[in-house]
Image: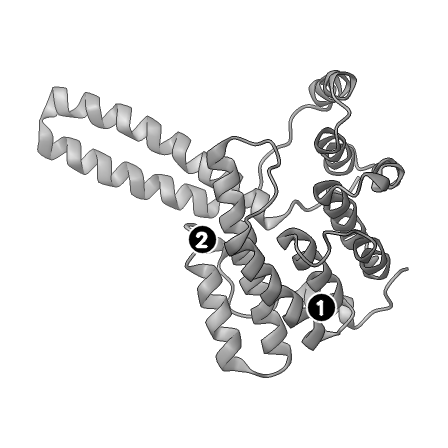
Amino acid sequence: MQEVQIDREVLYVQKIHFFMFLATITLFVFTAAIGIFGINIGLIVLSSGLIISYMAMVQKKHFSPPKRKVTAQRMAHSIAQDTSPLSLSCFASQLYYYFHEPTQAISLLEKFLGSQDPLLCTTLCDILLKEGRPIPVLYIIRDNPNALFDPLMLATQGVALLKIGKIPEAIKLFERSLHAAKTKGFPNNGSPWLTRKLLSLGYIAGIHHNLGDCYFTLKNLKQANYHYKAGNLLLFDISLWRYYPSQSVYSTQNHNISC
C-alpha cells in the first residue's frame, strides 16, 4: 500500500523535534566530558555533537508512523471523549495518513461541514488536494464564512488555484494569506506551544514558496527568488529550502484534474 506523503510543515516539526532530541543527548555528553576531560574537550564534544545532530536532521527524510493498533486505540478513545471539530479533524487526518482511508476520511469531514469550522474545512480540502481534486476545494471553501479571513483557508484556495493554472488569482490569495497570518495568526490545532510555533513558521514558509512557484511560472524570476529566499529564511533545516517549483506544480497543471 502506497504511503501518503505528509505535509512539509509537519515534516519540519518532526525534523526539529528530532534535532532537539539529539541536541539534548549532546548536552548530557558535553556535561560529562567537562567533568572528565575539562572545558576544552567539552566544547569540542559540544560543537561536534551539534554539527552531527544538524546533519542527521537534514538527512532524515522519513519518520515511521506509530503502530496502527496503538493509533486505532488512541483514535477510538479520543473520538469517544470528544466530538469537537478539532477532534474530528485529527481523527480524519489519522484515517487518511495512517490508515490510508481517503473515502472514509472525506465522508466523515463532509458530514460536519455545517459546523463551518475553519480547521475542519481546511483538513477536508487538504485531503481533496492530495487526492488530485482541486475544483471541489474551491466550492467547499467559498461556502465557508471564514474563506476570506482565515490564513489557512486562503492559502488552501491559493494552492487549488495554482494546481489548475490560475496563477494571478492564486497570487492574490497567497498574499492575502500572508497578511492574515501576520495579523490574525493561524487557528489553534490543540498542539503544544512549540509545535504550533514551528507549524506557523512552516506554513508561512510554504506560502512564500508557493508565491515563488507562481512568479516562477509567470517568469518573474526576481519576485520568485525573493519569495523562495523569504521562505527559506524561516526554515532551520536547509533540506526543506526551495529554489524552483516542485515537480508536482507542473504535473497537476499538465494532466486532467479530477473533480
Q: Residue furthest bottom?
A: 219
Residue 179: image quadrant is bottom right
Examine the rendering and report whether any part of residue 61 can be seen. no
Identify the secondary structure beneath mark 2: loop
Q: Mark 1 belongs to which amino acid?
A: Leu
Q: x%, y% of residue 170? A: 69, 69
Q: In the rendering, at what x and y percent does residue 34 appear?
A: 14, 25
Which part of the image, by quadrant, shows the C terminus? bottom right
Mark 1 nearby-residue class (10 Å; few <14, some 14–19, many ≥20): many
Residue 175, image x and y in percent?
A: 59, 67
The image shows residue 84 at horizontal and vertical percentages of 75, 28
Please tell me how crowded label 2 is: few (under 14), some (14-19), or many (20+) other residues with Cα within 10 Å. many
Q: Tell me if residue 207 can be seen.
A: yes
Residue lying furthest front: 145
Which residue type does callout 2 highlight?
Leu
Q: Secondary structure at mark 1?
A: helix
Question: Which residue is drawn at the image coordinates 17% and 25% (left, top)?
Answer: 33
Locate residue 113 relative to residue 167 in the image: left or right: right
Identify which residue, 197 or 186, lies in the foreground: 186
Residue tagged by mark 1? 162
In space, the residues marked 1 and 2 are separated at their CA atoms by 23 Å
Quadrant where the N terminus lies? Answer: top right
**First reached walking from the N terminus: tag 1 or tag 2:** 1
Tell me the tag on residue 235.
2
